[in-house]
Structures are given as C-alpha cells and as structure tokens.
Image: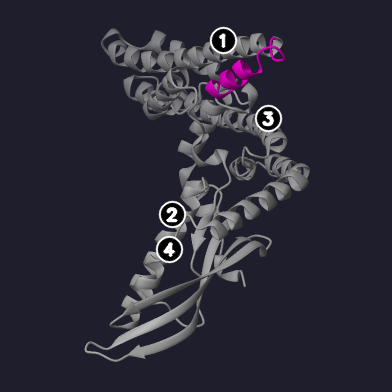
Amino acid sequence: MKKTIVILFLTVVAINSNAQTKLSDVNRIVLNTYIPVQSEPIPDQAKSLLENKLSQIASNNGMGGSAINPRFVLMASINVGTKDIIAGPPQMLAYNFEITFFIADAIDLKKFANSSIEVKGVGTNENKAYIDAIKNINVKNKEIASLIETGKNKIIDLYNSQCDFIIRDAMSLSKKGEYDAAILKLAAVPDVCENCYIKCMDTMQFIYQKKIDKECLLIMRDAKTTWMANQNGTGAEKVAQIINSISPFSTCEPDAGNLMKEVQGKLAADEKAKWEFQIQKHKDAVKLKEDALRIDEDANKRQASLQKDAQKQQYALQKADQEAGGLRGFVNSISKLKMTLWRDNSNDYINTNNKIDYSKIK
C-alpha cells in the first residue's frame, strides 16, 4: 500500500503541475526493433550497431518501442552487393550493401511497408567494413522517414478497422476473469487512432473497475478470516498488511475502513499506537483518491467552459486541450491515474505474457 500511495501522490502532483504529461508509451504507436537471421551472418559488433540504428530511427519518429505493445516491429535485412579486396598495405575489404528496412505486424505476420538504401563500408576486416557501412546510415534519411510514415498510416487504418473486434475480444477476456490480458489488449491501441482509443479507454476503465472490485472482495474475505482467527496485536498487524493492498478506487474500500475501526476497538491500549499508524496510511490513500477526483472534476469544468467558446476561440481551445493532456479532455486524470496503477502492479504480467516471436516474420 505504501508503494501505491507514493504512486498516487506522484501521479496527482504530475497531473496538477504538468498536465501535458501522457501515459508513457501506451499513448502512441510503438515500433520494437529486431534483426532477423541474415543470408550472410552479420558480425556481432556490427549487428549491435544496426540494432542501435533501428532504435534511433524509431525514436526519432516518435515510435520508440515498449514492452506493452510488441506487436509492431521495425526490421532490417542486409544484402551484400559487391565485395572487393583492396591491395595494401594494409589490405582492405570494400563492401557495397543494400539494406532493406520494413515495418511488420508480428501477430498477423504481415508487412506494412519497406524501403531500401545503399551504403558502402571499408575496413581491414569484415567486421570493420560492416561497422563502417552501418555508421553511414542516416537515421533521418527521407526514404526511411517515408517508410515510417507509410507504416504508421497503415497501422492506424488497421486499428480503426478492427476497433470493435478489439473491444469485443477484451470484454470476452474480462468475462473469463482475465482482466490483465483484457486491459493489455486495450492499452495497445495508440492515441493517434482517436475514436478507437477513446472507446478502448472507456472500456479499459470499466474492466479495471471490475478487476479491483473482485480483488477487493477476495482481500476483504482474507482479512476478516485472519482477524477472526487471531484477534490481538499480531492478528491486527496481519490484517493491516492485507488491507493495505486494496485499491482506494475499489467499491468495497469503505468495508476495509469499517474493519479497521472494528480491529482498533478491540485492541489493548498499548497496541493501538501501532494500529493508528496503519489507519493513517489507509486514510492517506483515500484522501489522495479524493484529491484526484476533485482535480478531475475541476479539469472537466474548465474543459466544458472552453468548449462553449470553441467556435470563437479555436486557438485557445486547442491550447487548453494540450494542457489538459490531449484528446480534447476525453482522457481525464482519473483514467490516467488508474492506468498508472495498473501498469505498476502488472509489470510482471506484461513482461512474461506479452512476448512475440519476431523470427516467424519472413
């Protein structure tokens, strides 16, 4: 709970002081990078340099990779055009390479776009020649930029055409109790697909609420059982540890407060001091939730006021929209805060259950 309180506090402060902050990589299309097996193996040092170049290309175009959305990938394939030996001393190797970049969907095994450039590399050995050639790749090359733009547009078209299916699949997972999988599917939708993104965020909040409400019921059952079995200081300490894992946004959170009052009433005077500290932690979490709700309500009021003057003050509305966190205020501070909490508590799930084998892309 202590960790959750810190996250809540930092999130509320961030929203209040700098509303332009967005939800990390969840809010944009991301391209992970991968070097497939080559017809002629790339030396290890050169391969590492090429991977860095791919990451720079993705980052320069606002599409840097993230574990939360590994579906789309930027790949590169090197084909040797010519290989010449230049007499020395020292003897040198000169290569002409054709490097093909392509953007692919690792789930549907579909390529969206590709583009090729030619580079030359010279070195005293194969590794140095490869490295020299890869260093000559301009990450701001117009053809590469065009490739990224084409791939981005096709990804957006994919999400817009598949939005209803994404939501339906997420709801199906939710009904089976697979809340994290459902939220992860919805979180992968980038905010550039505005209509779909907003629908998915609404659905995500609904599923997240179901998740924390179910978890709260199970936690409360465990807490009550623990207290009934051991109604003393030791039992109270265990109850506090259990209750402090409850999300302050869950609907059964007030039950936790009632149980804590019951425990406090039965504790001996010398044990109450320790217990009051646990109660204060619980109150702090609830207060932070209330502060976030208040901030969100104020932001919504400001947004509504601005929308009334939208036709006369379009520029002012756009500016205020950016300050409100983008997407015309649809994605409010509460949804952002909930998403932040979910990501923090689900990192292990994301890292272990969201892996894709890029080697299947041919």
Give yes or no for contact between labels 1 and 2 (Cβ–Cβ under 8 Å). no
| Magenta-drawn segment | 309-324
Location of mark 2 (residue)? 56
Q: Secondary structure at mark 3?
A: helix
Please tell me how many numbered marks the rendered image carries. 4
> Label 4 is placed on what type of residue?
Glu
Q: Which residue is mark 3?
A: 202
Q: Secondary structure at mark 2?
A: helix
Please name the residue that numbered disc 1 is placed on.
Answer: 298
**Circles 1 and 3: CB distance less than 8 Å?**
no
Q: CA distance from mark 4 to mark 1?
A: 45 Å
Mark 3 against mark 4, which lies toward the viewer? 4
**Residue 66 in sight:** no
272 over 32 or under it: above or below: above
Q: Earlier in the sequence, mark 4 or mark 1?
A: 4
Between residue 75 and residue 262, name the one nearer to us.
Answer: 75
Instruction: Kindly report which numbered mark, 1 or 3, lies closer to the viewer in this rendering.
Output: 1
Three-letter amino acid code at the position of disc 2: Gln
Magenta span: predominant SS is: helix
Q: Position of residue 284 (x, y in %)?
A: 41, 15
Left or right, 315 with respect to 276, comes to right
Q: Which mark identifies residue 51?
A: 4
Closer to us: 219 or 306: 306
The three-letter amino acid code for the residue at tag 1 is Asp
Q: Earlier in the sequence, mark 4 or mark 2?
A: 4
Disc 4 vs disc 2: which is toward the camera? 2
Q: For numbered disc 1, what is the local secondary structure?
A: helix
* Above or below, comparing residue 279 to residue 140 in the picture: above
Proximity of marks 4 and 1: CB atoms separated by less than 8 Å: no
User: What amino acid is found at the position of numbered circle 3 in the picture?
Assistant: Asp
